[in-house]
Image (cartoon, rainbow, N blue to C red):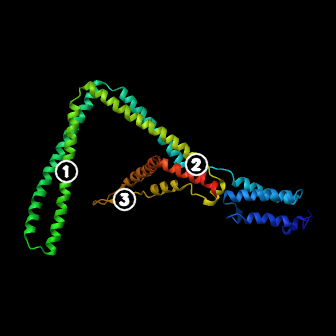
Amino acid sequence: MTDEATNADDFRDTTWFKEIEEIYQSFSLIIDDRYKPGTKKEIDHAKIKVEELKKKHKGNKDFNKEIKYLDDLLVDSGKRRFNGSKFTIIGVFLGILVMFYMSNRVEEKSGDLSIDKAESIQLDKIVKLERKIKSAKDEIEYSMTYTIPLKKEIEDLKKQEQSNQIIERIAAKEKNLASSEENNRIRETTISESKKQIEFLKSMSAEEYRDYKIGNDQEAADSVSGYAWKTILWFLLYLSAMFPFVFTIDKRGKKDKSKWLKIIGAILGSAQTVRYRRSDGSTYDDNSSYIGAFATAIALPVAAIALTIVLLPYIATIAFVRNIIVPYFY
């Protein structure tokens, strides 16, 4: 087939160039003034059209040069690239290592537990429980100095003429009384449970308590280790979900990958030295805000990592569905 123009300068008026432009204009994304495919269907449809044009304009060097750009775009848009959070990956990986470390430490300490050490732990727990019981009893006794007169006030108010003001005062005092009594019920439950624990601890010899503690420690270590292995499985699912199609990445736009550094930098930058002046005219500097800022800068990422690990099954599932499964259907 003869093209409408043979010179490189006026090929934009040719039929084949307009046909290529029609393919570009069928794409739903415009990024940096360039049309890009926004769905897998758009890519598949464009590939079919490209093959038809290649057969139609076979041997045309100008056409081959222009169609190559479109070919490369379709191939690149259909690739998968990493689009996850490096902070999340590093954080979860460190969290998994910490869990295995904790599990191993518990097992090691449990294996080295002697009878004398076990007896010392047993007696220490009994003493702490007895102190807990005494503290709860003291709190109940102290609250009685408040609740008994309060009950008397309520009774006296109820004997008076029930005006709106009296009714409101009665309601407020009854609310305070109910709160105090509820706290006492909680304290009584604490006392009861603590007594049961003391009775249980005293029922065992030092040898029996050591065996009991080793069993509990081993169970805890196995639980932490098991959770770590489950986290690894969810982590692998999350990693696989972090390689979406390029066309979905283009659709979402660029992410701010330095936001955590900016947050931490802002926290550290908020710290400042405060200079105070004494009554005698001398001055001293207070740098305590630096300690608080540094502690917050460490605590915030640690809390974020812990929350991410807890929510990882949901995060991984949603990411896998969104990035891997859904793009095949649109």
Foreground mark, 2 or 3? Answer: 2
Which one is nearer the viewer's eye here, 40 or 98?
A: 40
The image position of residue 63, as x and y in percent, is: 85, 60
Residue on which the image places disc 3: 275
- The first of marks 1 and 2 along the sequence is 1
- Find numbered disc 3 in the image and state the secondary structure of the residue it sits on: strand
Q: Residues within 10 Å of mark 2 (few under 14, many from 20)?
A: many
Which one is nearer the viewer's eye here, 153 or 289?
A: 153
- Left or right: where 86 falls relative to 166: right
The single residue placed furthest to the bottom in the displayed view is 163
- Find numbered disc 1 in the image and state the secondary structure of the residue it sits on: helix
Q: Quadrant of the C terminus?
A: bottom right
Residue on which the image places disc 1: 185
The quadrant in which residue 64 appears is bottom right
The image position of residue 296, as x and y in percent, is: 41, 52
Q: Which mark is residue 202?
A: none
- Residue 218 seen from this side: yes
Vertical placement of 65 versus 229: above or below? Answer: below
Residue on which the image places disc 2: 241
Identify the residue at image location x=18%, y=56%: 180
The image position of residue 77, as x and y in percent, is: 69, 55
- The first of marks 2 and 3 along the sequence is 2
- Residue 253 seen from this side: no
For badge 3, the amino acid type reads: Arg
